[in-house]
Amino acid sequence: MPFAYLRDEARGGRMDSRLMAVVAQGDCGRVYLSPTAEMEEVAKHTDPRGVPETRLPDKALGFRVQQYGMVRWQDLFTPRQLVALTTFSDLVGEAMGEIKRDAIASGLPDDDVPLRDGGTGARSACRGCGRVSGAGAKQTIGYL
């Protein structure tokens, strides 16, 4: 098929995604299951909340999805993936708040000095943990 045809179909809203497999934890590791019709419906009608409306750059070197009608970052993901990503993001934020409270309770100073400026207080502890957690969430994206 010519790329022009594919791009026109995508921009016209006539392309979609399909759930290809469901990954579950089995006794011997991961198990890949064919999705049932019910699983496909649940995945298709998932309603992500709190998704940023940020637009993609009009032109970017090596990044040409805009030609297929994907003009916002959220267009790059299925609703199911967006729910997972926003959930991870929310949990990292919550964890950072708990880490800061715990750090203050354990005696670290509440000095508001960031890690990049040599901070060793509660803010630095929670931000450092937040960065590591965020990096872990980023690695998870490939499995969604």
Image (cartoon, helix red, strand yellow):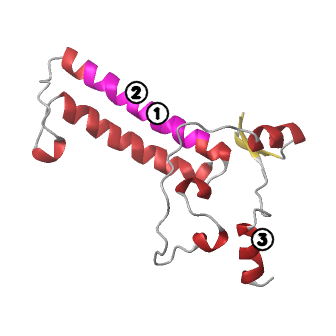
N-terminal of the pair, mark 3 or mark 1, is 3
Which residue, as the protein is rendered here, is positioned at the far front? Answer: 12
Q: What residue is pinned by disc 1?
A: 90
Q: What residue is pinned by disc 2?
A: 94
Q: Residues within 10 Å of mark 2 (few under 14, many from 20)?
A: few
| Front position among marks 3 and 1 | 3
SS at mark 3?
helix
Q: Residues within 10 Å of mark 1 (few under 14, many from 20)?
A: few
Callouts 2 and 1 close, C-beta under 8 Å: yes
N-terminal of the pair, mark 2 or mark 3, is 3
The quadrant of the image that shows the N terminus is bottom right
Q: Residue at x 53, y 47 (%)?
A: 140
Q: Residue at x 20, y 32 (%)?
A: 123
The quarter of the displayed image where residue 67 is located: bottom right
Q: What residue is pinned by disc 3?
A: 9
From this view, report whether residue 84 is shown above or below residue 109. below
Q: Residue at x 12, y 38 (%)?
A: 119
From this view, report whether residue 139 is shown above or below residue 104. below
Residue 72's x, y, as percent?
55, 58
Residue 44's x, y, as percent?
76, 44
From this view, report whether residue 38 is shown above or below residue 7. above
Which residue, as the protein is rendered here, is positioned at the far bottom? Answer: 2
Range of magenta residues:
83-101
Out of 95 and 26, give the one closest to the viewer.
95
